[in-house]
Amino acid sequence: DVKVTQSSRYLVKRTGEKVFLECVQDMDHENMFWYRQDPGLGLRLIYFSYDVKMKEKGDIPEGYSVSREKKERFSLILESASTNQTSMYLCASSKGQDSSYNSPLHFGNGTRLTVT
Amino acid sequence: AQKVTQAQTEISVVEKEDVTLDCVYETRDTTYYLFWYKQPPSGELVFLIRRNSFDEQNEISGRYSWNFQKSTSSFNFTITASQVVDSAVYFCALRSNTDSWGKLQFGAGTQVVVTP
């Protein structure tokens, strides 16, 4: 089974802090994604990556950046955390371009971030 | 633009009742994929089913069934004889061929509460 592991289940940070959310997958997937989940809004895509060192903006990239130095690891960075970034963050991975349209996303357990 | 609408925010049923979750989608593409995911209280989204736009056959998997109708742009999900373990948030999602790199557009989700 695909395993997507997010390093923290819960995080509490202060406004203005730099925050790193880490995600690791063990199935050699090319694509990795960061989504944000808020009540009534569903999941919204922040950033995604289709290869090492490659990244693309999703629907709500403002206030976030990402890093993918290794294929298995995809990090989400909040440069200066704000209270409106309090949310559930979900990482996902899927197979590469040739099969990506048919390939489901595999998700981690999520990181619930609270910014005070 | 792609859009997925799950009009039902929350559905409450008593165990053994059937429950149907509605999903309506919008896309200009002729080739696309539809997905359903389950998110139990543990937080991890679990992939349930994938359907491509050329396959309108309904599908049954145990107590789960899906009704795909292109004419009404709907992909509804029914749980028969619901159980307490079915309590979760259920998401419908869409991926079109023009969506780069396999990213999914999610609906807002429907919370299903099954009481004994």
Image: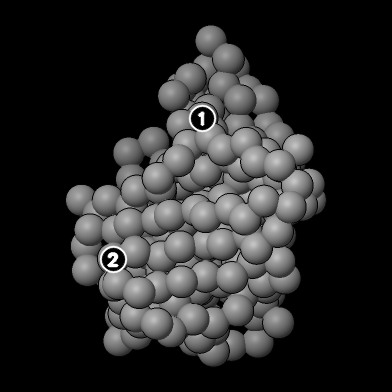
Q: Identify whether A14 is placed above or below A56.
A: above
Q: Residue at x 72, y 70 (%)?
A: A62
Q: Nearer the viewer, residue B115 or B100?
A: B100
**Both on one chain, marks 2 and 1?**
no
Residue depicted at 52% across the width and 55% down the height: A20
Q: Secondary structure at mark 1?
A: loop
Q: Quadrant of residue A65?
A: bottom right
In the figure, A54 relative to B63: above or below? Answer: below
Q: What residue did someone put label 1 on? A: B41
Query: Which amino acid type corresponds to the residue marked 2 in the rendered image?
Result: Glu
Between the C-alphas of marks 2 and 1, the distance is 26 Å
Is A93 on the left or on the right of B16, as rendered? left
Amino acid type for the residue under numbered disc 1:
Pro
Pick the front one: A18 or A29: A18
Q: Is residue B6 visible?
A: no
Q: Disc 2: which chain?
A: A
Which residue is rendered at x = 45% and y = 40% of the image? A8
Q: Could you tell me how many numbered marks the image carries?
A: 2
Q: Secondary structure at mark 2?
A: loop
Q: Position of residue B55 (x, y in %)?
A: 41, 74
Q: Chain of mark 1?
A: B
Q: Residue at x 76, y 38 (%)?
A: A116
> Which residue is under mark 2?
A72
- Relative height, residue B76 to residue B89 (above, below): below
